Amino acid sequence: MKNTYREMNIDGCPEIGRGAHGIVYRTAPDMLVKVYYEHVPLDSIQRERELARWAFVKGIPTAIPFDIVRIGERYGTVFEHLIAESPSAYIKRSPEHLEDFLKRSVALMKKVHAIEAAPGELPDMKQKHLGWMPRMRELLPAELYSKLSRIVDEVPECRRILHGDFHMNNILICGGELMLIDMDTLCTGDPIFELATIFVSYRQFPSIEPKTAHLLGIDVETAALICDRMFALDLCDADEETIREVKRRAQILGCMRVIDYMDRHPELPDQKKVIRRCVEDMTARLSEVP
């Protein structure tokens, strides 16, 4: 199997993006290569490729890889005729670019959420959260578990498409337009689940380990600012109390997802620390719920 894919060398190529499953490099002015981490299996890479095609047909701005290659012991996917810049580089070029990027990011997010999938086409995020409830029962006192159960149950059922990992390392700026990558996290559900991933990426993880903000190409303070501004832009017609309540629910739901991820990756060095902190934060937020 290893010899069926052509070899590619990325030595000296600049990194322009980093996600949960791999790193994107520029190998030529109009060519990008996403190099997957060693633990990502080939079938997952092939599935992401098919999901990118499916998303493009649905009207989601995304890049479709045309080839799978080998980079040492890892796999990669190649994107041609794609001149792209990372959001972190765009933001660093000028302070006013941050607000422009955030406004366009929220517009892109809303565009994705306006599209519906057919039943069973993509994983259902509410069903995933319901599946995590037995684990939450182990971690929370009965009173708080009851509040959590009510919060999950009250999330509306819907089939809106969600990216599922909406942060700046999964966005490229191509010809002045924003384009989503890492399509293997596509799912359906209420937009609160997307806001949960935003809260986790820009506030939850950086508050536990500051280097997670640096992996986005920003500092902890900027990450917090991005989170708050994206919530404000998305909920532009809501009052401050409503925004605070949505943030509270987003953090609770986001922590559930982080705990599930950490449970499935015991090899991660900060696994216990992250789970402990998420339980502490869920406890604090749930205690605020009437």
Image: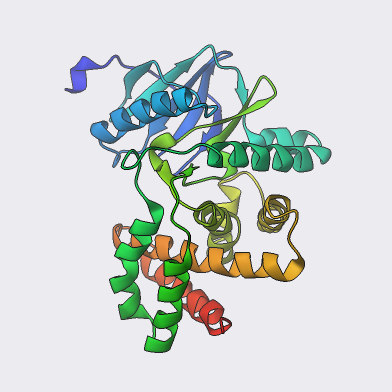
Which residue does the image show at 30% across and 79% down from the upper left?
Answer: 138
Q: Quadrant of the C terminus?
A: bottom right
Could you tell me if residue 246 is visible in this image?
Answer: yes
How is the rendered protein coloured? rainbow
How many marks on residues?
0
Residue 259 in the image, given as x and y percentages of width and height: 38, 65
Closer-to-camera residue (32/132): 132
Residue 209 in the image, given as x and y percentages of width and height: 53, 62
Which residue does the image show at 31% across and 42% down from the upper left?
Answer: 120
Q: Is residue 41 left or right of residue 235?
A: left
Q: Is residue 118 above or below residue 250?
A: above
Which image quadrant for residue 176? top right
Closer-to-camera residue (2/145): 145
Return the residue found at the far left: 1
Which residue does the image show at 28% across and 42% down from the upper left?
Answer: 39
Q: Is residue 105 left or right of residue 49?
A: right
Q: Is residue 83 above or below residue 246?
A: above
Q: Is residue 232 above or below residue 40?
A: below
Residue 215 in the image, given as x and y percentages of width and height: 55, 47
Q: Quadrant of the N terminus?
A: top left
Residue 230 in the image, given as x and y percentages of width and height: 68, 51
Q: Is residue 287 above or below residue 117?
A: below
Could you tell me if residue 11 is visible in this image?
Answer: no
